[in-house]
Amino acid sequence: MTASSDEIIDDATLLSAIGMLADALERITLPGVLELRLLARSLRKAEQTRQRTALEFAATTFGSLEADIRDQIFRHAVGFARDSVAARQSLAPLLGPIAAEPAVAPAPRRGSLLDAVNGRPALTARR
């Protein structure tokens, strides 16, 4: 089955990662990089509506950024994710065994928005 542009995202893990990346982007301050707000809004729309077209638009926006900006986004998002996991683990006694399970590190592959969502750094050269 091929992916349709109006396809609904039904992967809870992907939706959670999209939301976490949007949270991280909303906290990043890079003067002169207006695309960050557009990217965060696109990700938030993808998370809320579950529309693949919103995720594709976010991927296009992410791909238009310079490699060093993508790397900065990646580093910030990874730090945010680690802080979130640490907070989740500290709440584990209150929330139960599922809250204590750490995120699994993805295999290295780099360069796209989904790579950033999955915790992979961007390529050093612009695509």
Image: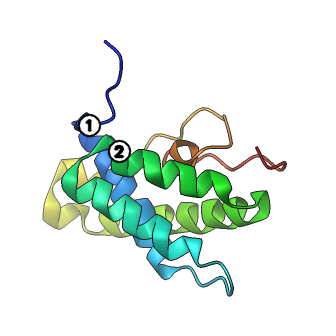
Mark linked to residue 53 = 2
| Residue 51 in sight here | yes
For the point 56% across and 79% down, the residue is: 28
Query: Pointer 1: what residue?
Result: 6
Q: Nearer the viewer, residue 94 or 49?
A: 49
State the separation of the CA atoms marked 1 and 2.
Answer: 6 Å
State left or right for residue 81 relative to residue 64: left
Q: Residue at x 68, y 87 (%)?
A: 31
The x, y position of residue 19, in whole percent, is 34, 60
Which of pointers 1 and 2 lies earlier in the amino acid sequence?
1
User: Disc 2 marks which amino acid?
Assistant: Thr
- Which quadrant of the figure has residue 20? bottom left
* Secondary structure under the numbered disc 1 in the rendered image: loop
Query: Could you tell me which residue is drawn at 35 percent across and 51 percent down?
Result: 54
- The C terminus - image quarter: top right
As drawn, which residue projects farthest toward the right? 125
Say which amino acid is labelled 1. Asp
Q: Are marks 1 and 2 in contact (CB under 8 Å)?
A: yes
Specify few, some or many for label 2: CA neighbours under 10 Å numbering under 14, 14-19, or 20 or more: some
| Residue 3 shown left or right of residue 96 in the figure | right
Quarter of the image with the N terminus in it? top left
- Expressed as whole percent of the image width and height from the top left, the position of residue 41 reads 38, 69
Farthest front residue? 5
Relative side of 102 to 82, left or right = left
Is residue 102 visible in the rendered image? The answer is no
What is the x, y in percent for residue 97? 20, 49
- SS class of the residue under badge 2? helix
